[in-house]
Each structure stands twice: as structure tokens, then as C-alpha cells.
Amino acid sequence: MAEELNVIGNGAPAKPVEKKSFWATILIFLSLIGPGLITGNFGNDAGGITTYSVCGADFGLGMIWMVLPVTVILLLYQEMSGRLGAVTGKGLSDLIRENFGIRIAFYLMIGKFLAGIANTTAEFGGIAASMELFGVNKYISVPLMAILVWLLTIKANYRKLEKIFFIGIAFFACYIVAGLLSPIDWHEVAKQALTPSFRMDSQYLMLLVALIGTTIAPWMVFYHQSAVVEKGISIAEFRYFRWELPFVGISVGVVIFFIIVTCSPLYSQGIRIETAQQAAMALVPLAGVYAKDLFAIGLLIASLGAAMILPISTAFSVCEIFGWESGVNKKFMEAPQFYGMFTIQIILGAAIILIPGIPLIQVMILSQTINGLLLPFVLVIMLILINKKKLMGEYANGPIVNFVAVAATIAITASVVILIYSSVFGS
């Protein structure tokens, strides 16, 4: 584009943006950073950490090559969802209702709400598992953390929540340190990372779809766009906002990489795991007790953060569909449906995980697989919306971005179809 323009909701240009000094530009960038980093990093939630751990334990370094492509695809769709929000000033659910009708929007929201319950349950499963590693029973930790999550969200506005999330992101470095403590053949890691491999058995395909579904989950697309709108980012500021993407890619990709690498020695030792908690315990003889503690801390912080973000995302989506007031910047009585939807998910997620004998790993893997199954529908809808000239004006996708986005969507859809076929007809 020859010059940056302010754009109103229908894509019509307004006045040119003034040139900024270097330090003014840096300050603008720092004021805008947040939605991408928070969405991307807390996509590495309890279900995600469990999925990455099982990938490493079940297939060693056989899935490490997937880290780069899924991270690139995450950044591609973050850029598009952010651009949609900046141009239109509306969340994705709003746009779906307006452009596809209330029926399609309603059915999609049913699927997203069910996935939201499963995902929130998985987060409390992660909280329970991590606290048990420190000797705290889930019947104590889960209710206390549920109350903490609820109070933080109800009492804090977006700016305060953003600061809390930034502090949480710093704790993901625990996985890097845990990986460095583990007995890793880094030459083999580099080789496997650059050598794509593929298997047709159902377990591999299930984990492949789960890995995609947890890295680029449907809730992330909805939350990211809503966060851009909530923060008031306009298209005039969007070029600065794009600078966040490299930081997102590095922080997200490195964490996924190190979790898989950290758990890969379990494969060579013939140790099978079903939970991130088991992964942490299994690391003790290989990497020492500190690796276990670091793994547990990372799991707890990831689960707490996602236990706030995931219900918020679902509440945003449902309220946008019905035209209800929404947003964490509003008080409870200003947006009762929004906070009511958030509260229901917290209560159900915590209650389900407190059921005696609940299989945590099945809940977590199931939640990520549901994400993978919903994802193609969400991505196709986003592609249609962002290519509407009437909606996006000159900010619609160009041919190169469209080619990459369509190819990625086809690949993701194909992996889901292969999973379903393999599940129905066997390996």
C-alpha cells in the first residue's frame, strides 16, 4: 500500500496517517502489543502441553518437524483475524451473523460452546495435575483456583488482565530450562526438525490433528479478533501491530519445540505417558527433580491463564451472536450475559474435573481434537470474510496471502478427513 490510511467499518478511506518519529513509533508499538502474544502463548495451555508431551513420548522427535509449519500458519491467521477486527471494528461472531445469517452463526456457536466447556475442563485438569505434583489435592486446588480465576476476571479490566497475562508468559521459559536439563542429542533434533515424516496409523493421525488443533485452536481466532476490537486497535495502527507477529512466532514455536524435545527421551526409554503430570514425573530419573518442578510450574501458569482466556473467548462469541453487551472492560451489571456465560463455564469446567476417577488425559486430548475438527469451518469462514471487498476494501487478502492461506486450510482439512476415515475404517 502506498500510504497507511484510517478506514471506517465499510473499508472507505479517510485521512492519511502522519509520519512518526522512531521513538514515537516504538511507543505506539509497545502500547499495541498484547493480543497476539497472549492468544498465541496461552494456546499452549493444559491440553496443548499434554498433547505436545504425548507427541514426544509416543513418537520421539518424529513430530518435531511440525513445529515450524503450524507456527507459520498460526501467524498467518493471527494477522488475518487482527486485520478483520481493525478494519471492521467487530468480532468474528458479529461478522458471521451479519454475513452468513443467524442460523449458521447459531450452530457454529453451539459447537464452540461445547468445545469451550471441554477446553475449560482441560484447563482445570491441568491445574489439578500441576498442583498434585506439589502435593496439593485437586479437591483443594481446583475450587480455590476457580474462585481466583473468577475474581481476577470479574474485578480486572482489559489492561490489568493484560499485565497478568504478560507475567504468566514469562513462566513459559520453564520449558526451555527443562529441555536444557534433559539428555538430548541436539544433532538429531536438528536433523528431525528439517526432515518431514508421516505415518498413517490412527494414533499418529489423532495426535497430528490434536497438535494442529491446540496450536491454532478456533477459540484463538475468535479471542484474538475480539481482543483487537476491545483494545481499540484501528487499521491506521495495524502496521505497528503487525510487528508483534515475529515475537509471537518465536515465543510460541520455542515452547512447543522444547516440550516435545524434553519428552522425546521418554520414547527411547520405552516410557509411555498419558498426562503431562506423568511426563513431569518420568523426567526425574532422566533430567532431575528440577525438570519436574519446572514442568509443573509451566503447566500451572498455562492452565490458569487459559482458564481465564478460553471462557472469555466463548462468552465474547455467544454475546456477539445475540447482540448482548460484552467485554472485560464492562462491569458485571453492564454485561450480565457475558459474565454469566463466563461463570457457567468456570463452574462446569471445575465441577467436571472434580468427578472421582475422571480420565484427565482423555478429556484433554478430546478437547484438542474437537478444536481440530471445528477449525476447518472457522478458517473457511474467515477466508470468505477477509476476501469480501465490500467489507474489507483495499485491505482484503492479496493473491500471495490467499494462496498460502487456502493451501494451509486445505492441508488442515485433509488431516481432519484422514483422521475421521482412519477412526472409522481402522489403520
Image (cartoon, rainbow, N blue to C red):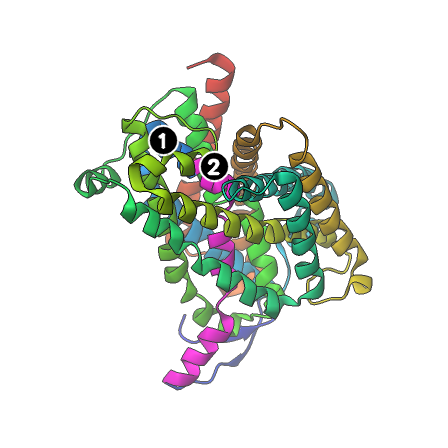
Q: Amino acid at mark 2?
A: Gln
Of 222 and 116, which appears nearest the observer? 116
Q: Amino acid at mark 1?
A: Ala
Q: Is residue 114 left or right of residue 86?
A: right
* Quadrant in the picture for residue 113: top right
Which quadrant is the C terminus positioned in?
Answer: top left
Q: Which residue is mark 2?
A: 277
Q: Does the image show residue 411?
A: no
Find out whether residue 107 is within the magenta segment: no
Of 81 and 367, which appears nearest the observer? 367
Q: Is residue 394 left or right of residue 427?
A: right
Q: Where is residue 302? Give x, y as percent.
A: 51, 50
* Quadrant in the picture for residue 283: top left
Q: Where is residue 229? Give x, y as percent.
A: 61, 64
What is the number of the mark on residue 57?
Answer: 1
Q: Main secondary structure of the magenta part?
A: helix
Q: Are marks 1 and 2 in contact (CB under 8 Å)?
A: no
**Residue at 48% across / 81% down in the picture?**
17
Q: Does the image show residue 28?
A: yes
Q: Mark 2 packing: few (<14 Cα in 10 Å), some, or many (20+)? A: many
**Residue at 68% across / 35% down in the picture?**
352
**Residue at 60% across / 39% down in the picture?**
137
Magenta range is 22-51
Find out whether residue 37 is within the magenta segment: yes
Mark 1 → mark 2, Cα distance in angstroms: 13 Å
Q: Where is residue 103? Give x, y as percent.
A: 73, 40
Secondary structure state at the residue bearing disc 1: helix
Q: Earlier in the sequence, mark 1 or mark 2?
A: 1
Of 323 and 277, which appears nearest the observer? 277
Farthest residue toward the front? 135
Secondary structure state at the residue bearing disc 2: helix
